[in-house]
Image (spheres, grey):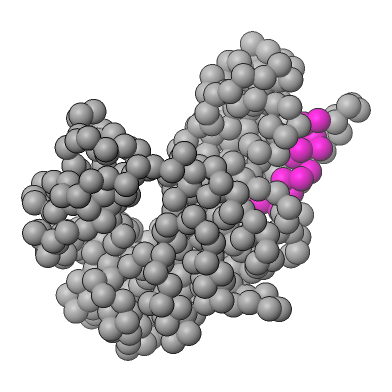
Amino acid sequence: MKTSKTTENQQGKYFLATFGCQMNEYDSNMIGAMLENRGMAATEDAAQADVLIVNTCSIRGGAEDRAYARIAAMKYHKRQRPGVRIAVIGCMAQNHGDKIPASLEHVDYVVGPDNYKELEGLIFSEVAPSERKVWTDQNDFENYEGLMARLDGTVSSHITIMRGCNKQCAYCIVPNVRGVERSRDVESILAEVRHAVNEGIHEVCLLGQTVNSYRTDTDNFAGLIRKVNAVEGLKRVRFMSPHPRHFDPETIRAMAECGKVCNHVHLPLQSGSNAMLKKMRRQYTRERYLEIVAELRAAIPNVAITTDIITGFVGETESDFEDTLSLMNEVRFDHAFMFSYSPREGTPAFGETETLTAEEKQARLERVIEAQMKHTEERLDALLGREEELLIEERSSRDSREWMGKTRCFKKVIVPEVAGVEKGAFVRARISERRGIVLRGEVITQAVPAEK
């Protein structure tokens, strides 16, 4: 969860807390830009804000619980300052709708992901507020064209290229709360990339629920990659999260041929069992997934592959689980986000009889984590002694005399403070040591000064 940064303005202040994924972070930055264009200023102190906004996530129950707790605590501000307005937005707002103000009476507005323009109107309305509290109508065409989000960093920034999802995976709530898939116009994306570069950004990460299914009347994802790669002044391009179904030869060829595209792919797996993949509605097989991995590794030298894995989905047998472990052993992912399955109301799998206890699902998750930790350490150890390009992002969180940078394959490397190293600089470093899952290195070439 992140809060907004503070600026000074005399037209009123807003406080914005964000839960969830990079898509939510981007939406918060878009809303922040919307409010600031109307003269408001951001504050990290909720007690100073005229408007309190909580951007919520609904992907898992724990995310919703944390959001509810944060919103409930805001009742204090309503008691102290009755005029303050409180808005709950995002995926949980869409998912729960009227349930939110019914249980949290101090909430003024509940606004879904397709209604953020409505939120702007509510905040700046000069007429008496409506009795209506919930705006969750879905709009299959809303792409917020013409709106640019605030940058979410000074070195690297995310840019959403599409909204919604058409996949209907059995465990996933996203299509219900984010609506159908729609892609932004390529020129609006390129304008946002150029704006980011003009503000000093070196690296952009293109975002979408299934980012590589991007398609307009004139462009597909491969074509978009090539056009973003051609933006003058941009140094690195990343994207997430792609779907295995849309990794075709044209996309892989574009990645290999575009020099700014980093050699890292987050390729969600979820399960190594064909039976589970079919039940999950994932639209690919174990065999096709392994083919994609082989194609990526053949086309892109030293590509890092990360993934998502779910254990204990409804009906998962011991044999299905072993299929996941065996695929992990074959691929040897650089990193993985690993979860045990939890039912989400509104998903196709909700209501199916669970076949595993919570303890059994947890035990399988722990085995997956143990296997992945071994693979992660192996992949990191393979970089020892290598020279890698680093983009310096920030001071080390453990020692302010050191810097943290990321390789093109998305590995964190800590380097000592030396002349010429600064935030936003590119350096070449020799990887000398691994401490846990963090690499350390020595700068071996003069840093390229960050562009001002």
Q: Can residue 350 be seen from the camera position used here?
A: no
**Residue 269 placement: quadrant:** bottom left
**Residue 420 placement: quadrant:** top left
Horizontal placement of 90 versus 126: left or right?
Answer: left
In the rendered image, residue 234 lying in the magenta stretch gets the answer no
Q: Residue at x 59, y 36 (%)?
A: 54
Q: Residue at x 29, y 62 (%)?
A: 409
Q: Residue at x 20, y 43 (%)?
A: 414
Q: Quadrant of the N terminus?
A: top left
For the residue pair 395 and 47, the one nearer the viewer reads as 395
Where does the magenta region start and end? 113-124
Q: Residue at x 35, y 42 (%)?
A: 449
Residue 168 vs 402, above or below: the answer is below
**Residue 297 placement: quadrant:** bottom left
Q: Position of residue 398 (x, y in %)?
A: 21, 32
Residue 44 vs 345, above or below: the answer is above
